[in-house]
Image (cartoon, helix red, strand yellow):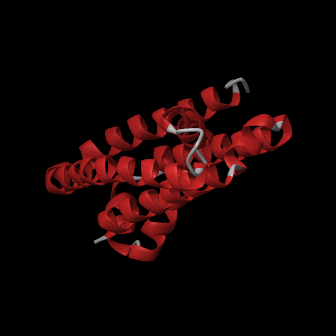
């Protein structure tokens, strides 16, 4: 289903962040003001774009669009949303290394810790997806979709704007 494809995309995006963290590339991005700013601007712009797009969608367009979105597009959107969020790599970069032993392989330890996190991440994300899928039939009425679109669009735009103000530490 499209929901499972989006979740798989988010999962793959997170796996990529874990691998980049294990390779030390996330640390390079964190230390480089320029690379961090590029990632931040791309992520913020993408959130604002999505927010405006969702906010402007009409209810009938939304129902029709949902039925026409391929699983491939859902997967790519999930992965892009995961990869364009600089807080994702900041999480992995700041959280995982505190559990690494200095006398063991950093790369292997980060990968194993990332795998452990993913084992927790998958059932939680699947639960959200299945819950959303189960209540979707009740929400596809035009009056609900308009308000849902406006709320989600506003949240996405607000998140994008707040990301522009996020300071590099």
Q: Is residue 37 left or right of residue 6?
A: right
The answer to which quarter of the image holds residue 168 is top right
- Image spot of residue 47 (x, y percent): 58, 44
In this orientation, which residue lies closer to the viewer: 52 or 92? Answer: 92
Picture residue at 59% right of the left edge, 54% below the top? 107
- Image spot of residue 112 (x, y percent): 44, 53
Q: Is residue 111 visible?
A: yes
| Quarter in which the C terminus is drawn | top right
> How many numbered discs?
0
| Quarter in which the N terminus is drawn | bottom left
In this orientation, which residue lies closer to the viewer: 25 or 151? Answer: 25
Picture residue at 71% right of the left edge, 23% below the top? 167
In this orientation, which residue lies closer to the viewer: 73 or 143? Answer: 73
> Residue placed farthest to the front in the image?
103
> Residue placed farthest to the right in the image?
34
Q: Is residue 70 left or right of residue 126?
A: right
In this orientation, which residue lies closer to the viewer: 29 or 147? Answer: 29
Q: Is residue 88 left or right of residue 1?
A: right
- Image spot of residue 32 (x, y percent): 82, 38
- Image spot of residue 56 (x, y percent): 50, 47
């Amino acid at each position: 289903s499209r929901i499972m494809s989006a979740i798989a995309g988010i999962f793959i995006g997170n796996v990529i962040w874990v691998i980049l963290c294990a390779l030390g590339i996330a640390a390079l991005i964190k230390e480089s003001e320029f690379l961090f700013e590029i990632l931040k601007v791309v992520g913020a712009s993408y959130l604002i774009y999505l927010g405006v797009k969702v906010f402007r969608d009409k209810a009938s367009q939304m129902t029709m669009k949902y039925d026409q979105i391929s699983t491939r597009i859902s997967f790519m959107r999930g992965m892009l949303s995961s990869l364009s969020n600089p807080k994702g790599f900041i999480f992995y970069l700041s959280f995982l290394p505190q559990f690494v032993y200095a006398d063991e392989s950093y790369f292997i330890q980060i990968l194993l810790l990332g795998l452990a996190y993913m084992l927790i991440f998958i059932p939680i994300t699947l639960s959200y997806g299945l819950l959303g899928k189960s209540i979707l039939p009740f929400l596809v009425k035009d009056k609900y979709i308009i308000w849902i679109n406006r709320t989600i669009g506003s949240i996405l735009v607000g998140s994008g704007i707040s990301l522009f103000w996020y300071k590099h530490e």
